[in-house]
């Protein structure tokens, strides 16, 4: 009897980490699916993200339901994914995505909270490689028209990398001062390990051209291949 109980206990302890890993993997796969759904919805809205900008983008980052809440001190937190065009200079079809994180804050009199979907267009090779190498801090506040009421777009320029990132947001709820200024975007390699079932970093995923698009990311990649199949310099 004691041996049976010991065996059952051992089996339970052995299975627990497996459940935890599986749960994490499913969560990251759900994020990929959310990224695809959000991008498909946003690109389906007339007069939203200009087609010429989408055609020129080297990479697209999607953060579904970024949380921003603050009283005096602002903050943002989000998890999403970035897919880039394959090829040496990011000029071909869209490839396997790397998981991404967004973190940061801003100072100001802000009261309230909201969840916002963000789509970021990385407009040049330097910006794409900079993001793959590590954190990129967003700054600047030049605004450009975004189309329908409730959508916002802002040009975010990282002065160090001299890269240009255009950010579009779809708001859910009320909040004063929607902005990504002061936030950082970075690859989430821990999530990449869960999605791809092996240790693989963002640079390997995007630059090797050997990583297959996971099933959870099919809508994200296929939407871009349908909406912006050709890169325009």
Image (tube, grey):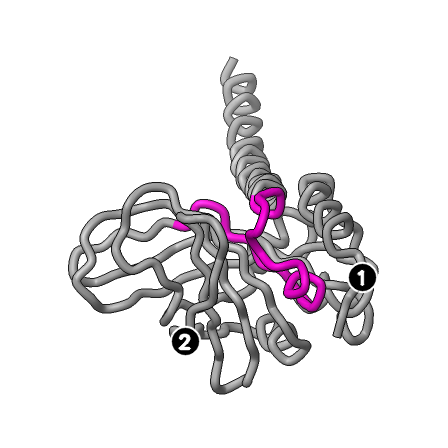
From the top left corner, tell me how far across and down residue 122 is, in percent.
60, 68
In the rendered image, which residue does mark 2 sit on?
A: 139
User: Residue at coordinates 60% horizontally, 76% vertically from top-left?
Assistant: 127
Q: Please tell me whether residue 102 is drawn above or below residue 113 in the rendered image.
A: below
From the top left corner, tell me how far across and down residue 70 is, in percent.
22, 55
Q: CA distance from mark 1 to mark 2?
A: 29 Å
Looking at the image, residue 7 sits to the left or right of residue 214; the answer is left
In the rendered image, which residue does mark 1 sit on?
A: 230
| Marks 1, 2: nearer the viewer | 1
Q: For residue 64: magenta?
A: yes
Q: For residue 214: magenta?
A: no
From the top left corner, tell me how far across and down residue 113 is, in percent.
27, 47
Residues shaded magenta: 42-66
Q: Please tell me whether residue 18 is drawn above or below residue 103 in the rendered image.
A: above
From the top left corner, tell me how far across and down residue 97 is, in percent.
67, 55
In this rendered view, identify the residue nearer to me: 205 or 77. 77
């Amino acid at each position: 009897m004691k041996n049976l109980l010991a065996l059952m206990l051992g089996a339970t302890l052995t299975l627990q980490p497996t459940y935890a890993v599986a749960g994490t993997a499913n969560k990251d796969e759900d994020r990929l699916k959310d990224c695809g759904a959000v991008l498909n919805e946003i690109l389906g809205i007339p007069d939203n993200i200009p087609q010429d900008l989408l055609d020129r983008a080297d990479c697209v980052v999607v953060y579904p339901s970024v949380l921003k809440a603050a009283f005096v001190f602002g903050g943002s937190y989000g998890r999403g994914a970035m897919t880039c065009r394959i090829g040496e200079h990011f000029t071909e079809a869209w490839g396997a995505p790397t998981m991404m994180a967004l973190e940061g804050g801003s100072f100001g009199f802000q009261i309230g909270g909201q969840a916002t979907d963000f789509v970021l267009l990385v407009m040049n090779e330097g910006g794409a490689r900079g993001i793959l190498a590590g954190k990129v801090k967003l700054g600047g506040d030049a605004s450009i028209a975004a189309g329908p009421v409730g959508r916002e777009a802002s040009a975010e320029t990282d002065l160090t990398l001299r890269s240009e990132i255009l950010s579009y947001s779809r708001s859910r709820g009320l909040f004063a001062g929607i902005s990504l200024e002061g936030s950082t975007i970075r690859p989430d390699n821990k999530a990449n390990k869960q999605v791809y079932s092996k240790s693989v970093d963002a640079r390997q995923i995007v630059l090797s051209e050997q990583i297959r698009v996971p099933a959870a990311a099919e809508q994200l990649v296929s939407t871009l291949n349908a909406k912006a199949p050709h890169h325009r310099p």
